[in-house]
Structure formats: structure tokens, C-alpha cells
Amino acid sequence: MFTGLVQGKGKITARRFCGGDLQLRIDTAALCKVALDEGESIAVNGVCLTATAIDGSAFGADVSNETLAATTLGTLEVGDDVNLERSLVLGQALGGHLVTGHVDGVGEILRVVQDGRSSRLQISLPGALTQYIAARGSVCVDGVSLTVNEVQGNKFSVNVVPHTMAVTTLGEYGPGTRVNIEVDIIARYLERLLQGREDETGGIDADLLERFGFGREHKQGQ
């Protein structure tokens, strides 16, 4: 698990295809105040990868065909910057939101507009993911935990403060940039719970809302 609070930017130093999969080598000089461990999980642009062949501040990672198909990692070139975050440790402050590193789909930056000292990014995403995006909810964009400002159809907007623009790759993006999107895990589990209920009863009713904490205030006020 991760928080979506990027700890540093890394750089792709090598890439090669091996047996149909992709092998990346990533320099993590900006991240590694503590030495990496062989086999630990690291989020690279929001994608959970396993660190191997550790050498100083650099590590290797295998990217499977499944990951190549579902994320933007296959488009990375030598010299590209990437967002890095080491996995969450029990007792660590959760400053962003719970992020799994399992990307749900690829979105595209449509607009970048200056909004005071911040930047407002408008992002399109696959239609199947729109139901999981809600205003004031959380979303992970290339490994960065952000708050959704506005939702319009298959587009949503986020406001990115100057600090985040400076310490992540978001400041390098413009219209046409493709980004990894992970929706809020709570929305995923809620959908599954509702599906299970619909299988039993065919829909949402007062009892279902009561079970999930909705409607109690109204009931107490009667």
C-alpha cells in the first residue's frame, strides 16, 4: 500500500525488452535516504513494482505484459523522470489516501490552466471509470494523491499546488500527456458491496442505506 505522497523523482537510466516483458532500471538518488531492500515494493508513476538488482541508489524492475497494457510504463524512455514512493509502513502518517499501486486505466491531460499560484489540470479518463470519480473525492494521477475539484462527463479537474508541481513530474505535463489513473479503493469496494446486494434483492432500498450509515439521522429526527 502507498499514500500517493511522492517522496522523490527518479530517472529511467535503462530499458530493454526481455522475453516479451520490459525491464527498467531506475535511479532513485532523490528517494533513498535509507537503502533499498531487494524485493520491496516501489510505486513508479503510481504502478507498484518490485525492486530487484539493487546497486547503490538504482534498482531494476520487471514490467509484465499485463502492466504494459494497462499503464503508461511502456512509453517511458531513458532520461524520463518518474514519481517514486516506497510502500507504506505501519505507524506511518497517512497524508494522502490509500493507494494500492494497481492502475485502473490511462487518462489524458486535456488542459493545464494557471489558477492563482496553483495549476488546474483537466483530465479525461475511460468511460468505465467515471462512476468512481466524485467531486471532493480522491484520485491518484501518476502516483500523486489529488482531490477532485469538478467532474464533467468523462473529464475531471484537479488543483495542484506549487509544491506538488515542483517535487513531482506533474509540472512537466501538458495537453496530450497520458497518465496512470487509480480510483479510490473505497469506491471499488462500495461498488462490490452494492452489487452483492443487488444480486440478492435487485436494487437499493432503505435497509441497504441503513446498513451503510445513510438515513440514520433522518430516522432519529422523526
Image (tube, helix red, strand yellow):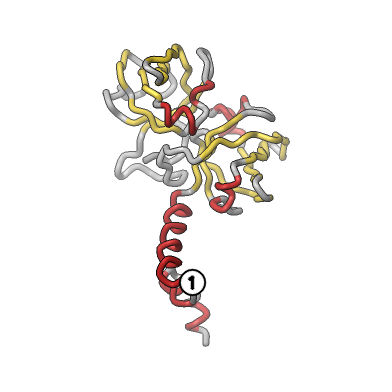
**Amino acid tagged 1:** Phe
Give the side of residue 179 with respect to residue 97, left or right: right
Residue at 45%, 58% (x, y): give it: 190
For label 1, count other residues whose C-alpha is less than 10 Å away and answer few (under 14), some (14-19) or many (20+).
few
Q: Classify the position of the N terminus by image quarter.
A: top left
Relative height, residue 160 to residue 69 (above, below): below
Query: Could you say where residue 185 lies in the image, as x and y percent from the top left?
Result: 44, 49
**What x and y, as percent, mark residue 20?**
40, 19
Q: Quadrant of residue 48?
A: top left
The residue singled out by tag 1 in the image is: 214
Q: Nearer the viewer, residue 53 or 208?
A: 208
Judge whether residue 28 can be spotted in this image.
no
The residue positioned 45% from the left and 12% from the top of the image is: 13
Q: Quadrant of residue 211?
A: bottom left
Q: Secondary structure at mark 1?
A: loop
Between 102 and 163, the one nearer to me in the picture: 102
Q: Nearer the viewer, residue 215 or 114?
A: 215
Tell me residue 17's x, y (percent). 42, 15
